[in-house]
Image (tube, rainbow, N blue to C red):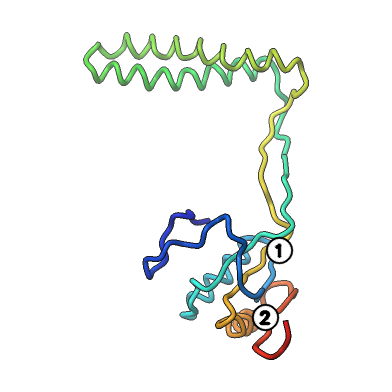
Amino acid sequence: MSNPQNRNPDNRTSRSLRERPSGWPVGSFNSYADAQAVVDKLSDQEFPVSQLTIVGVDLMEVERVTGRLTWGRVLGGGALSGAWMGVFFGLLLGILGFGFWTPMLLGILMGAVFGIVLAVVPYAFSRGRRDFVSSTEIVAGRYDVLCEPEHAVEARDAIARMGLGRGGRQAQGPGQGR
């Protein structure tokens, strides 16, 4: 995925994220990777890909449970993340000339203690209402490739020649009804 602040080759700012995408649907795909591959192949054919937009449709939030959350896991995770922060501060103090090993060890120890406290307090207040670890992502049911009208028929035909996609709505030329 690209950053919304990226610039197009002609130095214009990309379309705003808050605007509804415009254009005609020229292909529909089961995965983002498939839609991206089609855009890449169109680019290889010298198609003006700045006229294309990939749109995720039928969005859903998916939470994948990755494991059980226990006191040991909370304590260990808090200590580890705090210790890393302590390494950072220990290195900073070491660079500033306060020795190396003493600030490093104190930073790790104090960071681990603070990390444990900052992890234990919220977990204790949850009182077992969420005893699992998970990751959440937004996924789409399908990914449509849209194209600006002046190049839509050309894009649709090129995608059809590739034999990719899952059909769906096709671009129509002028006078063919929309």
Using the image as rendered, state which of residue 154 and residue 74 is in the foreground. 154
Q: Residues within 10 Å of mark 1 (few under 14, many from 20)?
A: some
- Pick out the residue farthest to the right: 129
Q: Residues within 10 Å of mark 2 (few under 14, many from 20)?
A: many
Q: Position of residue 74 (x, y in %)?
A: 63, 18
Q: Which mark is residue 62?
A: none
Q: Residue at x 39, y 20 (%)?
A: 87
Q: Which residue is mark 1?
A: 30
Amino acid bearing label 2: Ala
- Pick out the residue farthest to the bottom: 175
> Which of the 4 quarters of the picture holds residue 160?
bottom right
Quarter holding the C terminus is bottom right
Which mark sits nearer the N-terminus, 2 or 1? 1
Vertical order, 48 against 84 (above or below): below
Residue at mark 2 to residue at mark 1: CA–CA distance? 18 Å
> Which of the 4 quarters of the picture holds residue 55?
bottom right
Q: Residue at x 65, y 87 (%)?
A: 173
Vertical order, 162 against 76 (above or below): below
Q: Position of residue 78 (x, y in %)?
A: 56, 18
Q: Nearer the viewer, mark 2 or mark 1?
A: 2
Using the image as rendered, state which of residue 157 and residue 79 is in the foreground. 157
Q: Which mark is residue 171?
A: 2
